[in-house]
Image: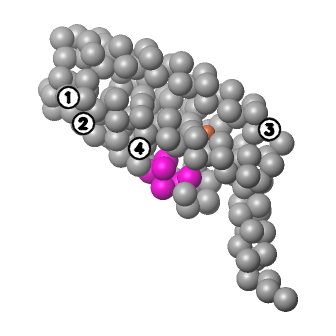
Amino acid sequence: MVEITRSFEIEVEAIDADHRQLVEIINEITQAIDDGRAGECADLVPNFVEFSQQHFAREEALLTKHAYPLAEKHRQHHVGLTDKMKNIQALSERAADSQPAADALRKELVFILMDDVINEDLAFKSFLMKAEARDTSGDDAGS
Ligand SMILES: [Fe+2]
Ligand SMILES: [Fe+2]
């Protein structure tokens, strides 16, 4: 079971909510593998892939909106992750008949989430926190 601890929170609610949702889908998939229901992976993994894509788009839009200097680099990072999703998709289709495929699938999902999705996002945490806080106080400023 994967959990997002405080130190992995970006402290921008829209992004943290997405990350929690990604964790939830991954936990659902690993639970299915543990319970001998690996056949469900072929249905569950596309949810993960689709939600990841939506999340990447939301994140990139937010970084662009605040003119994050390394937005393009982060977008490229997402492109790399999207590439890895093809392998994950292929593993999910074999998971029902192959324990090694199911094990590899579990490893890949956790790796993508922890090492890529969340660790890399920490790079823009303080930038985005400040930018969002500025936006909020700007809205209240009035005249
Ligand atoms: Fe993210
Ligand atoms: Fe990201």
Q: CA distance from mark 4 to mark 1?
A: 17 Å
Most distant residue in the bottom direction = 143
Q: Which residue is mark 1?
A: 40
- Mark 3–mark 2 CB contact (< 8 Å): no
Instruction: Name the quadrant containing residue 121.
Output: top right
In this view of the protein, can residue 4 be seen by the observer?
A: no
Q: Amino acid at mark 4?
A: Val
x, y percent for residue 87: 43, 15
Label 1: few (<14), some or many (≥20) within 10 Å? Answer: some
Q: Residue at x 27, y 16 (%)?
A: 93
Extent of the magenta region: 15-20
Q: Amino acid at mark 2?
A: Gln
Front position among marks 1 and 2: 1
Label 2: few (<14), some or many (≥20) within 10 Å? Answer: some
Front position among marks 4 and 1: 1
In the visual, does 76 lie left or right of 131? left
N-term mark: 3 or 1: 1
- Mark 4–mark 3 CB contact (< 8 Å): no
Q: Kindly state the secondary structure of the residue where label 1 is placed.
A: helix
Q: Between 50 and 40, which is closer to the camera in this rendering?
A: 50
Q: Kindly state the secondary structure of the residue where label 4 is placed.
A: helix
- Mark 4–mark 1 CB contact (< 8 Å): no
N-term mark: 4 or 1: 4
Q: Amino acid at mark 1?
A: Glu
Reply above or below: 115 against 128.
Answer: above
Q: Which residue is mark 2?
A: 31
Q: Which mark is residue 70?
A: 3
